[in-house]
Each structure stands twice: as structure tokens, then as C-alpha cells.
Image: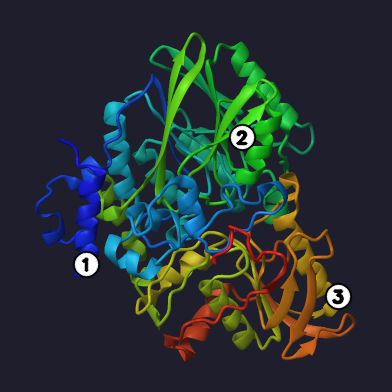
């Protein structure tokens, strides 16, 4: 007999009421095998895909707070993925105060995190993958990319720890984004040396700068239960803009709708009866792409870290396409089952499963690998830098407490008036009272271009920077949204109107009570420059210098802009 949702909620209620963690022996003692039964998902159809994305090199279970601000404008207003908190729960028919509410929203995060424990971790993900493959031996496991970057060990091994972990996990195909920040040579080395014959690296939209030849395989065709299926790869189209272009000097990117349509037609011509795009576009871009390119059954998406419980069904001239997005940090595993008959998809089932580490035993083989690969670095990873008195998190359109800490450190250590920190979406969460180790710090800053800088910029230049990043985030056309969240700002107050036109969104810039003057210069500290040749100490050295003088880190007061016209936007917390 299965472990019903009602029984599971009863177990959680006991844990919550007694203040126990979900894995406490007294909570689950009466329900042996409870975790495994919670993850029972009946097989359906004859074609299956398992999908994770944007794990950002997190091999261990972590805490991760979902955003309380994820604004939608224009056509995206009030539509997934731009729903947060209660609005998201209502849209998807979820009850507050449940495990699902914790997995998919920021609500009551600190209390819920203590009750339900950590999420993700490759050893726990491996257990879930094996369990699902037992009922779906034909299933392909797809990795949406942003896998080789985001942790200290991934940085120090040039992604090798994650390459080997994914091979052990049984990944069949992947696409990419942050992988390219290891450089062209390293990416090609991994594909030739580690992936050859075992794992397909797919990207239909990456071509050579000189002749426009494909750099990677555009697609792969496999057979499942006698049904030919195709997976087409779509790498992040704006890699040379959002990240340093000098790291991929020989390659061009872009969305390339026309070539994607050509690839879809090509695989259909070769007999594919189901076509899936493994995308790193971001969900808004995927939704538009699904309306323009025909013949795609589903887009399994990433980049924007949106844990969406159900797919969007997007109409196009020849039918419809399912658009999904599977969150981040190995926190979720998407399961897509197709019933393919008569040469086409007749029906589907989709479930985005939260990976609760306390409900899934660690896979012994994967756990042994993780311990082995981390062992040489353990003294550095475990080094204690400070203790956080408040919650430290990153996600949100305009700021997070981790980024506030980073800009505070930049201003103090660099002697700056103003500080900028990139609007990265990756980065784990620290609970109040938790020790900030070097590993947890590196979860926020582990990139291959970590230089910090101090420059004198005019007020006019500062406004231009803010306007450009804001347009990347709030341009009404998703095809012009080319980056992450809004740049995080320290020291400077400003007003933002997301619905205004390009160049008109930022106003009322104030520093220490005085209006910013267009012709006056200000000292601005930042990090992660995309221009080649930038010099400066790496950001982790800046943070370590700050922690030496702040052994206990007080709760952060977020510096966020005054928003115009967003009062009833369901992408913002009430």
C-alpha cells in the first residue's frame, strides 16, 4: 500500500508541531519506507524523460529560498513563471503550509526549512532517478545545463567533479550556459575525453564565427519502446553578452528560430514521433519560441530557475507545445511521460518532484564518489569565516540578503560610495545562526572571472548601467531579455518603473540624501567584469577581508528600489 499524500501531511504536521526535523526517527518510525512511497509515480505511456537543470554544481543537499519578487510585465503579467507566494499556490491549486508550498515558494521559509530539512544533493537525486527508472527503464535523463559551475570544487577542478558526477548519475544528454565560462578549449576537451560515446552535448544554436558551421551536435534521436524520439539542444543564446565574450571568441550564439525549425523538420523527416527541446533560454523566451516554432511536443527549460509545478500549454500554427522549467540546485526532478500512438503524441503526464534529502536515502555509490572528490579540498571547504545572525539568500528581481552582504563588503573594503553586484540567480541559502564556511561563501562567488574593481563613474554612466540591465530584465519582448536579475546596488537609492520604456525606467537616484548629478563622478565598486583585461583582487578575497572584521554578520537591510506601478503585481510579495 502506498504512502498517501494525507499520510505524508500527517507526518509533516507531527514534525512541525514538535519542532523536529523531517528525518527525526520518532517522526517516521511508524512509516518505514515513507520517503520511497512518497515518490511513487505510476508509469504512463511509452516515452519518458527525466529532467533537471541549473544545479550549479551543488553535490550536497542545501537550503534554497525561492524568490519573493519575480515580476512579470506586458504579456507575462500574472502568468507563470511570474507568480510568487500565495499567488503561485492559488494558481497551481496547492495548500499553504505543506511540503509543496515550501518547495515552490518562499513562504515561512525559515520555519519550513527547519521542519522539512535540506533539498537536493546528487546522492539523493541518484536514488530518485534509479527509483523512477525502475518503472521507466526506457527514460532519458536530460541535464539542462549550468552544471559545471557554482561551487568551490567545480571551480577548483574546472568542472571535472560535476562531469564525473553526471556520468555516474546516468545523464544521457545536456545543453549549456555557464559551462562556456570554462572556455572553448575546456568544453571541447570534456566532450571529446569524458563524454565520447556516453553523453551527448547538444546545442543547435552555437556555430563557428568564421563559416557558421555547427560546433556541437544539434540533436540526438533515440528509440523508446520502438518509438523514435528526438532531443534538440538549445544553449543559452546570449552567452557572449551575459558572460565574457572573450571566453568563447570563435563561436556565435543566438536564439536562431529558423535553424531550430529546420532541425525540428529534419528529425521529423527522419521518423521522430516525439520531439523535445532541451533548452537553456529561460521560460519567457521558451514560451515565445514555442509560439513560433512548430512541431515541438515539449520544451524542457532552464536558465531562469523557475520551479513550475505544471507545464504551460502554448498554441502555435500547427498545434501546441508544452513548456516547463525545472528549478535549480538539484532541488527538483521533472518527469514527462508521453503516450505516443499513430506516429504522434496522444497524451502526456508531467510532475515536478521536489527532492527532499530527508525522504530519499543517499545512493551509496554516488555518496562515496562525492566524499572522494571533496576529500582533497575538505580543509578549505570547512574553514569557518563568520556566523550569520540573519537569513542569507540570493533570489529576487532586485536584491537578496547575500547580495546585500556582498555590496556592503565591497563598499567597506574598497572604500566605495556605491557598489554593484551581478544579478546572478544561483547561490545557496544560509539559515540564521549558521556558520558561513568558505564553501558556503564560494557558493555565491565561484566564477572564472572573479575580479573586483573600483572605478570612478559619472552619474550619467551609473544611470545608463542601471537602465541597460533593467531593460534586459523587463523588456516586453522576451527575445531582448539577455541576462539575469537586476544588478544589486549598494549605497544608492533609486526608483524603478518596470513598465516604462527603454531608458526611462530609472529615476530619483540618491546617495546619502543627495541627488546623483549627471556630471559628477562617484567611486563605484563591483565584481565579475565581462570585459577582458580587468584587474583586481578576486571577490572571495574581498569577502574574507570583510569577515575578518565582522565575525558575526548582522541581519541585512535590503537596499531595493521604490517600484512604480507594481502594487498589485502577483510577482511580488504582498
Relative height, residue 522 to residue 121 (above, below): below
Which one is nearer the viewer's eye here, 68 or 406?
68
Of helix, strand and loop, which one carries label 3? helix
Q: Which mark is residue 203?
A: 2
Give the spatial CA distance, label 3 vs label 2: 39 Å
Residue linked to disc 1 = 17
Residue linked to disc 3 = 460
Mark 1 and mark 3 in contact (Cβ < 8 Å)? no
Q: Which of labels 2 and 1 is toward the front?
A: 1
Of helix, strand and loop, which one carries label 2? loop
Quarter occupied by the C terminus: bottom right
Quarter of the image holding residue 353? top left
Give the spatial CA distance, label 2 vs label 1: 49 Å
Q: Residue furthest right?
A: 519
Number of numbered discs: 3
Let me know if residue 535 appears in the view: no
Residue placed at 81% from the left, 86% from the top? 515
Which one is nearer the viewer's eye here, 198 or 304?
304
Disc 3 or 2, which lies upstream in sequence? 2
Amino acid at each position: 500500500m502506498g504512502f498517501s499524500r494525507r499520510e505524508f501531511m500527517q507526518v509533516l504536521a507531527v514534525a512541525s508541531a514538535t519542532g523536529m526535523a523531517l528525518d527525526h526517527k520518532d517522526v517516521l518510525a511508524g512509516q518505514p519506507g515513507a520517503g520511497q512511497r512518497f515518490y511513487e509515480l505510476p508509469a504512463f505511456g511509452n516515452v519518458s524523460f527525466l529532467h533537471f537543470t541549473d544545479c550549479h554544481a551543488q553535490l550536497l543537499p542545501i537550503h534554497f529560498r525561492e524568490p519573493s519578487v519575480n515580476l512579470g510585465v506586458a504579456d507575462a503579467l500574472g502568468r507563470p513563471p511570474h507568480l510568487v507566494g500565495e499567488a503561485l499556490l492559488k494558481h497551481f491549486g496547492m495548500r499553504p503550509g505543506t511540503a509543496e508550498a515550501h518547495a515552490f515558494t518562499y513562504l515561512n521559509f525559515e520555519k519550513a526549512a527547519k521542519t522539512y530539512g535540506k533539498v537536493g544533493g546528487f546522492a539523493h537525486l541518484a536514488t530518485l532517478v534509479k527509483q523512477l527508472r525502475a518503472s521507466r527503464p526506457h527514460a532519458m535523463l536530460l541535464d539542462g545545463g549550468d552544471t559545471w559551475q557554482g561551487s568551490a570544487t567545480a571551480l577548483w577542478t574546472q568542472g571535472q567533479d560535476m562531469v564525473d558526477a553526471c556520468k555516474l548519475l546516468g545523464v544521457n544528454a545536456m545543453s549549456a550556459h555557464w559551462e562556456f565560462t570554462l572556455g572553448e578549449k575546456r568544453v571541447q576537451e570534456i566532450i571529446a575525453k569524458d563524454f565520447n560515446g556516453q553523453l551527448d552535448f547538444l546545442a543547435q544554436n552555437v556555430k563557428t564565427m568564421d563559416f557558421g558551421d555547427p560546433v556541437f551536435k544539434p540533436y540526438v534521436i533515440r528509440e523508446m519502446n520502438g518509438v523514435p524520439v528526438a532531443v534538440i539542444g538549445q544553449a543559452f543564446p546570449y552567452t557572449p553578452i551575459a558572460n565574457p565574450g572573450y571566453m568563447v571568441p570563435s563561436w556565435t550564439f543566438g536564439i536562431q528560430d529558423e535553424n531550430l525549425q529546420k532541425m525540428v523538420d529534419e528529425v521529423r523527416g527522419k521518423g521522430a514521433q516525439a520531439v523535445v527541446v532541451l533548452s537553456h533560454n529561460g521560460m519567457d523566451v521558451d514560451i515565445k519560441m514555442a509560439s513560433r516554432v512548430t512541431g515541438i511536443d515539449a520544451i524542457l527549460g532552464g536558465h531562469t530557475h523557475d520551479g513550475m509545478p505544471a507545464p504551460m500549454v502554448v498554441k502555435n500554427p500547427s498545434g501546441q507545445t508544452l513548456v516547463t522549467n525545472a528549478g535549480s540546485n538539484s532541488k527538483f526532478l521533472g518527469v514527462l511521460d508521453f503516450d505516443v500512438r499513430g506516429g504522434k503524441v496522444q497524451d502526456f503526464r508531467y510532475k515536478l518532484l521536489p527532492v527532499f534529502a530527508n525522504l530519499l536515502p543517499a545512493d551509496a555509490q554516488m555518496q562515496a564518489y562525492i566524499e572522494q572528490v571533496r576529500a582533497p579540498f575538505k580543509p578549505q571547504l570547512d574553514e569557518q569565516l563568520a556566523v550569520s545572525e540573519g537569513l542569507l539568500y540570493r533570489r529576487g528581481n532586485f536584491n537578496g540578503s547575500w547580495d546585500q552582504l556582498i555590496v556592503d563588503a565591497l563598499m567597506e573594503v574598497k572604500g566605495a560610495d556605491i557598489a554593484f553586484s551581478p544579478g546572478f540567480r544561483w547561490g545557496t541559502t544560509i539559515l540564521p545562526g549558521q556558520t558561513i564556511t568558505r564553501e558556503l561563501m564560494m557558493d555565491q562567488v565561484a566564477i572564472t572571472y572573479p575580479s573586483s574593481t573600483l572605478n570612478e563613474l559619472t552619474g550619467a554612466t551609473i544611470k545608463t548601467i542601471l537602465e541597460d540591465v533593467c531593460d534586459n530584465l523587463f523588456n516586453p519582448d522576451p527575445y531582448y531579455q539577455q541576462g539575469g536579475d537586476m544588478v544589486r546596488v549598494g549605497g544608492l537609492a533609486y526608483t524603478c518603473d518596470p513598465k516604462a520604456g527603454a531608458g526611462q525606467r530609472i529615476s530619483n537616484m540618491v546617495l546619502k540624501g543627495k541627488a546623483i548629478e549627471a556630471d559628477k563622478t562617484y567611486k563605484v565598486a563591483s565584481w565579475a567584469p565581462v570585459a577582458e583585461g580587468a584587474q583586481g583582487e578576486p571577490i572571495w578575497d574581498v569577502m574574507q577581508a570583510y569577515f575578518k572584521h565582522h565575525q558575526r554578520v548582522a541581519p541585512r537591510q535590503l537596499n531595493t528600489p521604490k517600484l512604480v506601478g507594481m502594487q498589485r503585481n502577483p510577482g511580488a510579495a504582498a
